[in-house]
């Protein structure tokens, strides 16, 4: 039987790399330089991205197992189940917050066309943005975030 793919699998059973088998291939069940387990896959796959999102390697059973696709970008496959990772969502919140701060930098420059009271309003807004990640409650997506109101 021909090998179609080489699968490089992490400790949680997640396929990190899938590549077409060709030429000389590393030995199955060996480990690569990053410690990833190498498995052969003998069947063609029509949609590799979909397959990767719906399968994992079960170390106990020694086979690939089907699973539900990842529920959102804030979940990771840990211990044979999708696990919520709030830290990933907080990274996105911080990125958006940094972008909002960057977009308002101009308001604090000496040559800004704003009045002193407008600059004070913008400075207060920027302080709320800087403090923001520590003040948000329980959120499950960026859509749940209520950002400080930008001065008009």
Image (tube, rainbow, N blue to C red):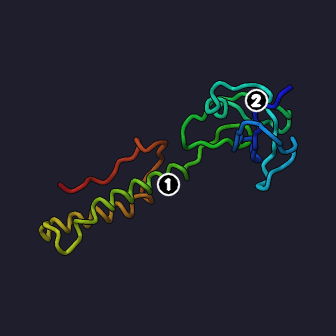
Which badge, 1 or 2, comes first in the chain's sequence? 2
Identify the mark at residue 21; answer none if there is no mark: none
Q: Nearer the viewer, residue 121 or 51?
A: 51
Q: Residue at x 62, y 27 (%)?
A: 47
- Numbered disc total: 2
Location of residue 100 with respect to 75 vertically, above or below? below
Q: Secondary structure at mark 2?
A: strand
Identify the mark at residue 91; answer none if there is no mark: 1
Give the image quarter of residue 53: top right
Q: Quadrant of the C terminus?
A: bottom left
Residue 101 left/right relative to 80: left
Residue 27, position as x, y percentages in the image: 87, 43
Residue 70, position as x, y percentages in the image: 60, 35
Q: Residue at x 43, y 58 (%)?
A: 133
Q: Residues within 10 Å of mark 2 (few under 14, many from 20)?
A: few
Location of residue 34 with respect to 49 vertically, above or below? below
Q: Nearer the viewer, residue 118 or 35?
A: 35
Q: Residue at x 31, y 54 (%)?
A: 148
Residue 87 left/right relative to 108: right
The residue wearing badge 2 is 65
């Amino acid at each position: 039987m021909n090998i179609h793919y080489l699968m490089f699998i992490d400790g949680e059973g997640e396929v990190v790399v899938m590549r077409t088998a060709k030429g000389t291939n590393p030995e199955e069940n060996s480990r690569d330089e990053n410690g990833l387990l190498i498995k052969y896959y003998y069947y063609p796959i029509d949609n590799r991205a979909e397959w990767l999102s719906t399968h994992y390697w079960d170390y106990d059973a020694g086979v690939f197992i089907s699973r539900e696709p990842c529920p959102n970008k804030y979940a990771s496959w840990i211990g044979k189940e999708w696990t919520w990772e709030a830290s990933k969502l907080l990274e996105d919140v911080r990125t958006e917050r940094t972008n909002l701060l960057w977009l308002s930098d101009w308001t604090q420059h000496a040559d800004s066309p704003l009045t002193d009271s407008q600059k004070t309003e913008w400075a207060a807004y920027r302080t709320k943005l800087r403090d923001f990640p520590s003040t948000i409650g329980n959120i499950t997506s960026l859509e749940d975030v209520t950002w400080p109101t930008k001065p008009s």
